[in-house]
Amino acid sequence: MTYLIACRKSGQALLLDPVLEQKDRDLYLLDELGFELKYVVNTHVHADHTTSGGLVRKERSKVQTVISEASAAAGDVKVKAGDAIFIGELSLEVRATPGHTAGCLSYVLWPSPGDRGPAMVFTGDALLIRGCGRTDFQGGSAENLYDSVHSQIFSLPDETIVYPGHDYKGRNMSTVGEEKAYNSRLTESKEAFVKIMAELVLPYPQKIDLAVPANMVCGFQD
């Protein structure tokens, strides 16, 4: 899933986890809505698709790409836990949530002043709806993922809306409270969770051999 986050007052926007094949769609929507794209942000170095970040930056020179410092991937802006990304009056807090990969980040969008709505957290593949990302490649660790989710995501207010990196059952969102109550993996003990992840029989990702090298250089190679 790709997310467009924009500040209506400033007209600035960012794209989170954009996909190469949907580049033209995303840019068309930005232009149609009258937003100026400031950042292309990735939660991690993806193995299942190629980011459009590099090509977007090539077409729109003012755009900056953002990636985790821990990922060792190329990017105009390298971020780490405790940093913030600003678009107009909105700010996204950077939280390190390694485990699916060593460089995974989640981004918390806190309500702007005067907004009584709940916070939102964009979790990439760290926390999915009623599940989580796999931990068997790219420096993944079931132990780290369990600790990351519990300390960095489940510590948020229960009403915080969870927007995951993908979902294969047609679900678009959840809440921290729901996942704390109903996530069949992460409601287990740490020891049980590690056992569950170790016993998963998962196919080799079809696009990993192309996607990972490309995403290490923003999805664009000269």
Image (cartoon, grey):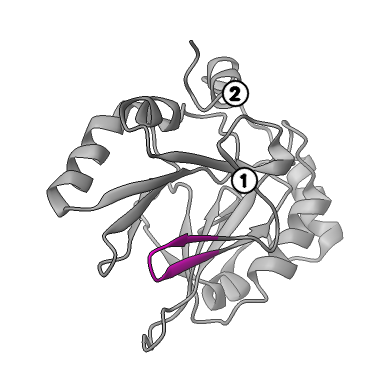
Classed neighbour count for the residue bearing mark 2: other residues with Cα under 10 Å, few (<14), some (14–19), many (≥20):
many
Residue sitting at x 29%, y 64%: 10
> In this orientation, which residue lies closer to the viewer: 215 or 77?
77
Give left or right: position of 29 versus 137: left
Main SS type for the magenta part? strand
Quick one: label 1 or label 2, which is nearer the N terminus? 1
> Mark 2 falls on what kind of element?
helix
Query: What's the magenta region?
Result: 85-92
> Mark 1 falls on what kind of element?
loop
Residue 103 picture quarter: top right
For the residues bearing labels 1 and 2, Cβ distance under 8 angstroms: no
Give above or below for 9 relative to 41.
Answer: below
Going by the picture, which residue comes out furthest to the front? 62
Q: Which mark is residue 167?
A: none
Three-letter residue code for mark 2: Val
Residue sitting at x 55%, y 73%: 176
How far across and down, in percent of the image, does residue 4 sit? 33, 53
Three-letter residue code for mark 1: Gly
Which residue is tagged 1?
133
Residue 7 picture quarter: bottom left
Q: CA distance from mark 1 to mark 2?
A: 16 Å
Q: How many marks?
A: 2
Q: Is residue 187 visible?
A: no
Magenta region includes residue 25: no
Q: Which mark is residue 212?
A: 2
Q: Is residue 118 visible?
A: yes
